[in-house]
Amino acid sequence: MKSIVELVEKKPWVGWILYLGTLAAVFGIGLLAASIFERRQESFRVQQVNPIADWEPRNEVWGQNYPREYESYMRTSETNFKSKHGGSAETDYLAEDPRLVVLWAGYPFSRDYKQARGHFYAIKDIRDTLRTTAPLPGTCWTCKSTDVPRVMNEMGAANFYKAKWADLGPEIVNPIGCQDCHDPKTMNLRITRPALAEAMARRGQDINKATHQEMRSLVCAQCHVEYYFQGEGKYLTFPWDKGFSAEDMEAYYDSIDFKDWTHALSKAPMLKAQHPDYELFMTGIHAQRGVSCADCHMPYKSEGGIKFTNHHMASPLQNISASCGVCHRESEENLLRDVHARQDRVKELLQLAQDALAHAHIEAKAAWEAGATEAEMKPVLTLIRHAQWRWDWVAAANAFGFHSPLEAARVLGNSIAKAEQARRELAIVLTAHHVALPVPMPDISTKEKAQAYIGLDMAAIEAQKLEFLENVVPQWDAEAKAREAKLPASDASKSNYPEKK
């Protein structure tokens, strides 16, 4: 310090250089700070032209304040993208592989199972599917609409679940959207479905303490998970008490002696996986590196100098540069090749499991018809139950195993082993009852033939659905239109909805 002072005293111009240099540095730091603050404001500024009511379900009302997000959300109506193993284009999985009809014999999925389309179609697709011809609880609406938080707030979650699905039809009309994930006042991410918070609480975790990055996955985990309807009230419950793995959830279900249905052919007490995307994702490398669902499925986008989250929730393969290219420096061709390589291997294992399970169900049917006893069949049926649960835990999840290829392969390997063990034990039972091996396989080469084999009257089911769409749905829409016409587009001072009676 002394030498600098002496230098300045001898040469005053050095002091001026230091002074001006300091001013320039401070000015530069100020510009940098201003730029950073401005960019942050581009991403997170809340600018509401019209205040949004607490439980506003209509996405177009939110879109008045957030046109970029709303415009990108509306692209979930597009159905023109089909990847090698997924996409938004409609695919009839039962027609693609009729063995699935046998695997789900006695369960509504044997009637109709298609590739899910974008969130825009959530209401239309649940109305249209042949799976909703049977009486259903209100629980089945839970993940389909922005109206659900509103109605739950009015009548309580328990009453919502135990209501009849058809009775709630006029109330549940707006598809998945803004209300499901955002607080209307602050735009902060929030949990609007109690099942997730309740599951975390049972594990000793407070959902309110989640970080913003964690919330970018947890809002998706409200629905993209495995769940079941508990008890007579059909209370929506996530089976996470023992853990998140396929084996943990199976142990949970076994401990409470739960089954989704009894298989129509094998009479096995079956479990139907829903879509355990979050659970499988959490075992993969992306989750381990702190990547969220939104990072890949809703990448940031810049438009007119504004940075925002692209709400066109879709396969990352539809926009590889924005979704994958942020972290990966390989070419798009190499990235796509890597994704397909992993998915192809998972599909190969899925096919082996499906084939073994279809044979096991049909062979079990032959054993029952030959006079097998419950004591003989019980260990076989447990193996079938556990084998198909593992297969379905991977098959029902989106991304064809890519969220965690190694875990998907491990679970499918165990599925194949258990299915083949069931067939070996069935061979012993069949032989004991003088049934010649191998058991003849029916012609299930098409969806229609497979459905006829398991005893479905598809003409009657389709007629029932047509009557519903022509006579019931228009009444629902008329009631909903009348109710929503009475609601102000936005009103921050009071609730938009009638007082709970």
Image (cartoon, grey):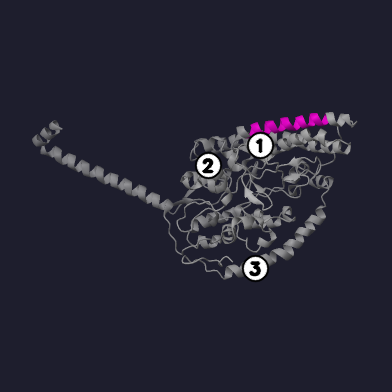
Indicate left or right for 144 with 7 as reference: right
Quick one: label 3 or label 1, which is nearer the N terminus?
1
Where's the C terminus, which quadrant?
Answer: bottom right
Disc 3 from disc 2: Cα separation: 42 Å
Residue 399 rendering spot, x and y as whole percentages: 62, 41
Residue 285 in the image: above or below residue 319: above
Q: Residue at x 66, y 35 (%)?
A: 346
Name, please, the residue furthest toward the right: 434
Q: Residues within 10 Å of mark 2 (few under 14, many from 20)?
A: few
Q: Is residue 236 magenta?
A: no
Q: Secondary structure at mark 1?
A: helix
Is residue 351 in view from this perspective? no
Foreground pick, 494 / 301: 494
| Residue position for label 3 | 479
Q: Is residue 411 magenta?
A: yes
Quick one: label 1 or label 2, which is nearer the N terminus?
2
> Residue type at mark 1?
Ala
Is residue 52 in view from this perspective? yes
Quarter residue 75 falls in: bottom right
Residue 283 in the image: above or below residue 318: above
Foreground pick, 308 / 103: 103
| Residue position for label 1 | 251
| Residue position for label 2 | 204
Which range of residues does the magenta coloring cover?
A: 408-427
Residue 379 rendering spot, x and y as whole percentages: 77, 33
Q: Kindly report the secondary structure that dominates the magenta region of the rendered protein.
A: helix
